[in-house]
Image (cartoon, rainbow, N blue to C red):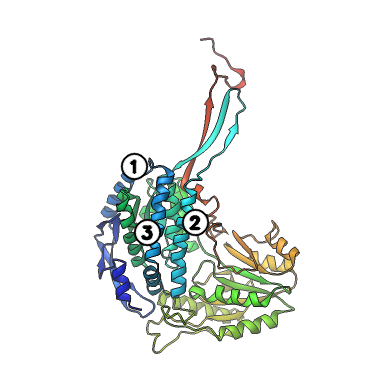
């Protein structure tokens, strides 16, 4: 694939201003070199935001909100629909950039752009369904209803592993809600943000949209701190590690703002004696090695009934021998690189900890070397036999390491599944109705996502995405997640000729 052609198609230059207010560019801070984990080469550089740049952005976005909130919701939805069409036109190029800058396979890159398209479609429909309730009043000749209004500026802090989809999940719903957005992308994938903004600008200008409704501020954690502590930003949507999320949550809470947090996962797949192994093995393998184990929904733990443990272990081990590792733009490969050498260091430290804590490595890991692996970011997916209480198992390692363990009763398996501080995604493989319903009940999985006969790594656009416990509790995408981006207002209307006061109080006037 001709990467230079891809970059040209997306408007990426050798040096790119990293601060964008619509199509207006700023960015006087130090530059970031975007280095591809695919080949270790510098793709391009992006300038960063200074505090002065940030103030210009916030001034522009505040002014844009005054106008944008006056547009009708269906009008805003129409703009988002057109953005979805623009993404369709650039799907191959943007998918390739995601793959090259982040390292996930080209197929997964295309899939991520498809998620953007899908949420635009969803948001279009939602723009006509920003429903409130009508209620009966306790007072005579009164009626009540509730409605939802635009919230204001939404700050979006995204992670490297889904460098475009998570932004779009937030912006598509925020825009139809009447909000304006300021995006602080990961400093590891800044070009994806520039490309998305370039695509958006064409749509915005064609529709006369205020330039400040979509802004980008590239930079390190200090830019994120500006957003988190800014009283002009009523909602911060942050995706990343639990450690980062706690810092953001505290900063936002200190000013009584709102946080929408999508943080760590330590997701488990329970495999029962009744499971169909033709479904189990692909779900477990893809869940564990997809995106080189760098999804918040990646399968980290496989909890297998003792009666089928050896059989499942053998099938997983054999399946791992078929996994092809290499250039993510080569569609023959299944697994690309980790994001950078720091991630590789974390992966190696985890494997060492497994052995030190008494685990048994079934499929050994290691860093790949030689032709095609010059970046130093390619690693072998590993499998280890462990117990759930091991310290390293309780920790989320953002890498392709799969932990396998036994259980005897389904209640024990559910307790093991729930026995971690994270609570994002979970799944059970079974054809037993009682086991499935128990897993989905209040006595079952304590995660925000609980699946039956599908892996942990699938996220449906139509459902609200997010988790519990140290995953943060936020919800994005489908269902009624749109309400997070709006303010609720309760209205009482008196259509009578007098004003009854509480407790029968009267004034002689």
Residue positioned 75% across, 63% down in the render: 434
**CA distance for labels 2 and 3:** 15 Å
Query: Residue 393: x and y, percent?
Result: 59, 72
Query: Closer to the N terminus: mark 1 or mark 3?
Result: 1
Quarter of the figure with the N terminus: bottom left
Find the residue positioned furthest to the bottom. Answer: 370
SS under mark 3? strand
> From the viewer's perspective, is 178 left or right of 275?
left
**CA distance for labels 2 and 1:** 28 Å
**Label 1 CA crowd tier, 10 Å (few <14, some 14–19, many 20+):** few
* Residue at the spot of label 3: 184
451 vs 473, nearest the viewer: 451
* Residue at the spot of label 2: 261
Q: Is residue 361 visible?
A: no
**CA distance for labels 1 and 3:** 23 Å
**Quadrant of the image occupied by residue 496:** top right
* Residue at the spot of label 1: 67
SS under mark 1? helix
**Label 3 CA crowd tier, 10 Å (few <14, some 14–19, many 20+):** many
């Amino acid at each position: 694939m001709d990467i230079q052609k891809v970059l040209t198609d997306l408007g990426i230059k050798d040096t790119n201003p990293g601060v964008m207010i619509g199509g207006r560019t700023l960015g006087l801070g130090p530059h970031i070199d975007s280095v591809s984990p695919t080949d270790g080469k510098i793709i391009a550089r992006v300038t960063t935001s200074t505090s002065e740049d940030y103030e210009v952005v916030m001034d522009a976005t505040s002014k844009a909100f005054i106008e944008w909130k006056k547009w009708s919701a269906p009008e805003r939805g129409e703009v988002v629909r057109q953005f979805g069409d623009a993404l369709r036109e650039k799907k191959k190029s943007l998918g390739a950039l995601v793959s090259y800058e982040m390292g996930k396979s080209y197929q997964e890159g295309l899939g991520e752009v498809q998620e953007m398209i899908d949420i635009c479609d969803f948001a279009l429909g939602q723009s006509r369904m920003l429903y409130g309730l009508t209620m009966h009043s306790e007072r005579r000749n009164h009626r009540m209803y509730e409605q939802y209004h635009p919230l204001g500026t939404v700050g979006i802090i995204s992670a490297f592993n889904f460098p475009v989809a998570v932004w779009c999940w937030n912006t598509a719903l925020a825009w139809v809600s009447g909000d304006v957005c300021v995006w602080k992308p990961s400093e590891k994938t800044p070009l994806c943000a520039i490309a998305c903004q370039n695509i958006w600008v064409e749509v915005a200008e064609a529709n006369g949209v205020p330039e400040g409704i979509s802004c980008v501020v590239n930079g390190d954690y200090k830019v994120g701190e500006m957003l988190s502590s800014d009283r002009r930003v009523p909602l911060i949507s942050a995706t990343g590690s639990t450690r980062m999320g706690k810092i953001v949550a505290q900063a936002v809470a200190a000013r009584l703002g709102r946080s929408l947090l999508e943080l760590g996962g330590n997701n488990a797949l329970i495999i029962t004696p009744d499971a169909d192994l033709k479904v189990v093995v692909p779900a477990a393998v893809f869940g564990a090695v997809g995106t080189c184990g760098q999804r918040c929904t990646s399968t980290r733990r496989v909890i297998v009934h003792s009666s089928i443990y050896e059989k499942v272990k053998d099938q997983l081990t054999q399946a791992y021998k078929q996994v092809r590792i290499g250039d993510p733009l080569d569609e023959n490969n299944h697994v690309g690189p980790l994001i950078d050498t720091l991630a590789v260091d974390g992966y190696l430290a985890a494997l060492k900890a497994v052995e030190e804590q008494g685990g048994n490595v079934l499929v050994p890991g290691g860093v790949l070397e030689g032709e095609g692996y010059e970046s130093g970011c390619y690693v072998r997916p590993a499998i280890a036999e462990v117990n759930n209480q091991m310290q390293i198992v309780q920790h989320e390692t953002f890498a392709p390491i799969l932990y396998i363990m036994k259980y005897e009763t389904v209640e024990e398996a559910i307790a093991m599944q729930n026995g971690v501080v994270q609570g994002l995604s979970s799944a059970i493989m079974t054809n037993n109705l009682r086991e499935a319903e128990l897993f989905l009940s209040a006595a079952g999985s304590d995660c925000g996502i609980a699946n039956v006969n599908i892996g942990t790594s699938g996220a449906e656009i139509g459902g609200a995405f997010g988790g519990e416990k140290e995953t943060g509790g936020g919800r994005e995408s489908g269902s009624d997640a749109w309400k997070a981006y709006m303010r609720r207002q309760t209205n009482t209307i008196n259509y009578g000729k007098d004003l009854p006061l509480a407790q029968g109080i009267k004034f002689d006037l």
